[in-house]
Amino acid sequence: MQILIDGNDSGLTAQTVPEALERGMNAVDSAGRIVVEIALDGTPLDAEQLENGAYETISAKTVAMVSLAPNELLLATFELGRNAIEAAQKHFHSAAEMIQSGQDAKAMNELHEGIELWCTIDQTVFQEAVPKIAELGGDQTPDGLERHVKELKDALESIKTAIESSDFAGLSDALMYEFPETSAGWSTFLGHCSQAVASHSELKAE
Protein backbone atom coordinates (compact mmCIF):
# COMPACT_ATOMS: atom_id res chain seq x y z
CA MET A 1 0.00 0.00 0.00
CA GLN A 2 1.47 3.34 -1.10
CA ILE A 3 1.41 6.33 1.24
CA LEU A 4 1.30 9.78 -0.35
CA ILE A 5 1.89 12.94 1.66
CA ASP A 6 0.94 16.24 0.02
CA GLY A 7 0.96 14.58 -3.39
CA ASN A 8 4.41 13.04 -3.02
CA ASP A 9 5.40 9.44 -2.47
CA SER A 10 6.54 9.28 1.15
CA GLY A 11 8.58 6.14 0.58
CA LEU A 12 6.53 4.49 3.32
CA THR A 13 4.46 1.36 2.80
CA ALA A 14 1.90 -0.55 4.85
CA GLN A 15 -0.22 -3.69 4.69
CA THR A 16 -3.42 -2.22 6.17
CA VAL A 17 -5.14 1.15 6.21
CA PRO A 18 -4.73 1.65 10.00
CA GLU A 19 -1.00 0.91 9.64
CA ALA A 20 -0.72 3.34 6.73
CA LEU A 21 -2.52 6.05 8.69
CA GLU A 22 -0.28 5.58 11.71
CA ARG A 23 2.93 5.72 9.67
CA GLY A 24 1.77 8.64 7.57
CA MET A 25 0.57 10.67 10.53
CA ASN A 26 3.80 10.04 12.41
CA ALA A 27 5.78 11.31 9.41
CA VAL A 28 3.59 14.42 9.13
CA ASP A 29 3.82 15.06 12.85
CA SER A 30 7.61 14.70 12.77
CA ALA A 31 7.70 17.40 10.11
CA GLY A 32 5.77 19.74 12.41
CA ARG A 33 2.69 19.71 10.22
CA ILE A 34 -0.96 18.75 10.73
CA VAL A 35 -3.04 16.32 8.65
CA VAL A 36 -6.16 18.05 7.33
CA GLU A 37 -7.42 15.47 4.82
CA ILE A 38 -7.11 11.73 4.28
CA ALA A 39 -8.21 9.89 1.15
CA LEU A 40 -8.29 6.21 0.25
CA ASP A 41 -7.81 5.62 -3.49
CA GLY A 42 -8.92 9.19 -4.10
CA THR A 43 -12.03 9.06 -1.88
CA PRO A 44 -11.78 11.36 1.19
CA LEU A 45 -12.56 9.94 4.61
CA ASP A 46 -15.05 12.02 6.56
CA ALA A 47 -14.91 12.76 10.29
CA GLU A 48 -17.54 10.14 11.13
CA GLN A 49 -15.60 7.37 9.37
CA LEU A 50 -12.47 8.34 11.26
CA GLU A 51 -14.27 8.49 14.60
CA ASN A 52 -16.17 5.19 14.32
CA GLY A 53 -13.22 3.27 12.87
CA ALA A 54 -15.03 2.40 9.63
CA TYR A 55 -11.76 2.82 7.72
CA GLU A 56 -10.25 -0.17 9.55
CA THR A 57 -12.08 -2.66 7.35
CA ILE A 58 -11.50 -0.81 4.06
CA SER A 59 -8.83 -1.98 1.64
CA ALA A 60 -6.97 0.45 -0.58
CA LYS A 61 -3.97 0.67 -2.86
CA THR A 62 -3.15 4.26 -1.96
CA VAL A 63 -3.55 6.31 1.20
CA ALA A 64 -3.10 10.03 0.54
CA MET A 65 -2.73 12.70 3.19
CA VAL A 66 -2.85 16.46 2.87
CA SER A 67 -1.09 18.46 5.56
CA LEU A 68 -0.65 22.09 6.54
CA ALA A 69 1.83 23.90 8.72
CA PRO A 70 0.26 25.30 11.93
CA ASN A 71 0.35 28.85 10.51
CA GLU A 72 -1.29 27.71 7.27
CA LEU A 73 -4.02 25.91 9.20
CA LEU A 74 -4.75 29.02 11.26
CA LEU A 75 -5.01 31.16 8.12
CA ALA A 76 -7.36 28.63 6.51
CA THR A 77 -9.48 28.49 9.68
CA PHE A 78 -9.81 32.28 9.87
CA GLU A 79 -10.81 32.43 6.20
CA LEU A 80 -13.43 29.73 6.72
CA GLY A 81 -14.65 31.66 9.76
CA ARG A 82 -15.13 34.84 7.74
CA ASN A 83 -17.00 32.90 5.04
CA ALA A 84 -19.21 31.28 7.68
CA ILE A 85 -19.98 34.68 9.24
CA GLU A 86 -21.08 35.95 5.83
CA ALA A 87 -23.27 32.87 5.31
CA ALA A 88 -24.83 33.23 8.78
CA GLN A 89 -25.64 36.87 8.14
CA LYS A 90 -27.40 35.92 4.89
CA HIS A 91 -29.58 33.49 6.87
CA PHE A 92 -30.38 36.22 9.40
CA HIS A 93 -31.22 38.72 6.66
CA SER A 94 -33.52 36.18 4.99
CA ALA A 95 -35.17 35.46 8.35
CA ALA A 96 -35.81 39.18 8.89
CA GLU A 97 -37.40 39.54 5.44
CA MET A 98 -39.59 36.48 6.05
CA ILE A 99 -40.77 37.86 9.39
CA GLN A 100 -41.70 41.13 7.66
CA SER A 101 -43.73 39.20 5.10
CA GLY A 102 -45.49 37.08 7.72
CA GLN A 103 -43.60 33.84 7.08
CA ASP A 104 -42.69 33.25 10.72
CA ALA A 105 -42.21 29.46 10.50
CA LYS A 106 -39.79 29.73 7.55
CA ALA A 107 -38.05 32.60 9.32
CA MET A 108 -37.37 30.41 12.34
CA ASN A 109 -35.73 27.81 10.08
CA GLU A 110 -33.44 30.45 8.58
CA LEU A 111 -32.70 31.81 12.05
CA HIS A 112 -31.80 28.33 13.28
CA GLU A 113 -29.38 27.83 10.36
CA GLY A 114 -27.68 31.12 11.14
CA ILE A 115 -27.36 30.39 14.86
CA GLU A 116 -25.95 26.91 14.13
CA LEU A 117 -23.26 28.51 11.99
CA TRP A 118 -22.38 30.97 14.75
CA CYS A 119 -22.11 28.09 17.26
CA THR A 120 -19.69 26.30 14.93
CA ILE A 121 -17.70 29.50 14.41
CA ASP A 122 -17.52 30.03 18.16
CA GLN A 123 -16.23 26.52 18.84
CA THR A 124 -13.74 26.14 16.00
CA VAL A 125 -12.56 29.70 15.46
CA PHE A 126 -13.11 31.84 18.55
CA GLN A 127 -12.38 29.21 21.21
CA GLU A 128 -9.78 27.07 19.40
CA ALA A 129 -8.04 29.04 16.65
CA VAL A 130 -7.82 32.59 18.01
CA PRO A 131 -6.04 31.56 21.26
CA LYS A 132 -3.42 29.72 19.18
CA ILE A 133 -2.08 33.02 17.82
CA ALA A 134 -0.41 33.71 21.17
CA GLU A 135 1.27 30.29 20.99
CA LEU A 136 3.17 31.35 17.88
CA GLY A 137 5.47 33.43 20.03
CA GLY A 138 4.29 36.17 22.32
CA ASP A 139 0.83 37.62 22.72
CA GLN A 140 -0.01 38.65 19.19
CA THR A 141 -3.79 38.35 19.38
CA PRO A 142 -5.26 41.59 17.98
CA ASP A 143 -6.88 43.94 20.49
CA GLY A 144 -10.65 43.91 20.82
CA LEU A 145 -11.34 40.21 21.41
CA GLU A 146 -13.22 40.79 24.68
CA ARG A 147 -15.20 43.67 23.16
CA HIS A 148 -16.27 41.54 20.19
CA VAL A 149 -17.22 38.64 22.46
CA LYS A 150 -19.41 40.99 24.51
CA GLU A 151 -21.03 42.44 21.38
CA LEU A 152 -21.80 38.95 20.09
CA LYS A 153 -23.25 37.91 23.45
CA ASP A 154 -25.42 41.05 23.57
CA ALA A 155 -26.64 40.56 20.01
CA LEU A 156 -27.55 36.91 20.61
CA GLU A 157 -29.26 37.91 23.85
CA SER A 158 -31.39 40.42 21.91
CA ILE A 159 -32.49 37.62 19.59
CA LYS A 160 -33.26 35.30 22.51
CA THR A 161 -35.28 37.99 24.31
CA ALA A 162 -37.28 38.82 21.19
CA ILE A 163 -38.12 35.15 20.58
CA GLU A 164 -39.14 34.51 24.20
CA SER A 165 -41.44 37.52 24.19
CA SER A 166 -42.78 36.77 20.68
CA ASP A 167 -41.60 40.23 19.64
CA PHE A 168 -41.17 39.44 15.95
CA ALA A 169 -40.86 43.10 14.99
CA GLY A 170 -37.99 43.48 17.45
CA LEU A 171 -36.47 40.22 16.22
CA SER A 172 -36.61 41.40 12.63
CA ASP A 173 -34.92 44.69 13.57
CA ALA A 174 -32.19 42.88 15.52
CA LEU A 175 -31.45 40.55 12.60
CA MET A 176 -31.66 43.25 9.95
CA TYR A 177 -29.91 46.16 11.67
CA GLU A 178 -28.09 45.04 14.83
CA PHE A 179 -26.41 41.82 13.77
CA PRO A 180 -24.78 43.09 10.54
CA GLU A 181 -22.60 45.38 12.65
CA THR A 182 -21.66 42.49 14.93
CA SER A 183 -20.87 40.29 11.93
CA ALA A 184 -18.77 42.99 10.30
CA GLY A 185 -16.84 43.55 13.53
CA TRP A 186 -15.99 39.88 13.87
CA SER A 187 -15.06 39.55 10.20
CA THR A 188 -12.67 42.50 10.54
CA PHE A 189 -11.23 41.04 13.74
CA LEU A 190 -10.54 37.68 12.03
CA GLY A 191 -8.88 39.60 9.21
CA HIS A 192 -6.56 41.17 11.79
CA CYS A 193 -5.90 37.69 13.20
CA SER A 194 -4.85 36.53 9.73
CA GLN A 195 -2.52 39.51 9.42
CA ALA A 196 -0.94 38.66 12.79
CA VAL A 197 -0.29 35.07 11.66
CA ALA A 198 1.06 36.20 8.28
CA SER A 199 3.39 38.71 9.96
CA HIS A 200 4.69 36.01 12.28
CA SER A 201 5.34 33.74 9.29
CA GLU A 202 7.28 36.49 7.51
CA LEU A 203 9.40 37.22 10.59
CA LYS A 204 10.13 33.53 11.03
CA ALA A 205 11.21 33.24 7.41
CA GLU A 206 13.73 36.08 7.69
Image (spheres, rainbow, N blue to C red):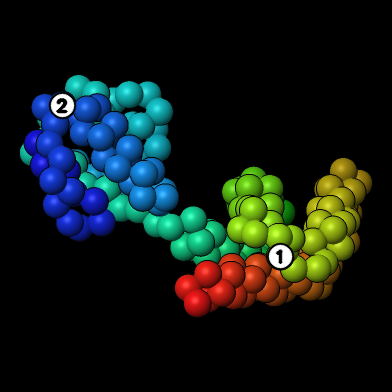
Q: Which mark is residue 140?
A: 1
- Please tell me which residue lies in front, 75 or 98: 75
Residue type, mark 2 in image: Thr
Image spot of residue 46 (x, y percent): 35, 40
| Quadrant position of residue 152 | bottom right
Which residue occupies 20% across, 22% down?
57
Identify whether 23 is placed above or below 201: above
**Residue 121 on image: x %, y %:** 63, 53
Given the image, on which type of amino acid does mark 1 rest?
Gln
Which mark, residue 48? none
In the picture, measured across the screen, residue 203 lies left or right of residue 143, that is left
Taking the spot 24% from the left edge, 51% from the top edge, the residue there is: 5
Front disc: 1 or 2? 1
Image location (x, y in percent) of residue 80? 52, 62
Give the answer, above or below, for where 155 lies relative to 200: above
Residue found at x 79% / y 61%: 145
192 to the left or right of 19: right
Give 201 or 159, whichever is nearer the viewer.
201
Do we see residue 47 in this rendering? yes
Of residue 164 and residue 13, the one placed in the foreground of this image is: 13
Mark 1 or mark 2: whose residue is earlier in sequence = 2
In the displayed structure, does residue 49 sit left or right of residue 148?
Answer: left
Q: Position of residue 100 (x, y in %)?
A: 75, 67
Residue named by callout 2? 16
> In the structure shown, which secondary structural element does the residue marked by tag 1 occupy?
loop
Q: Number of labelled discs?
A: 2
Taking the spot 14% from the left edge, 31% from the top edge, the residue there is 14
**What is the crowding at mark 2: few (fewer than 14 residues within 10 Å), some, or many (at least 20)?**
some
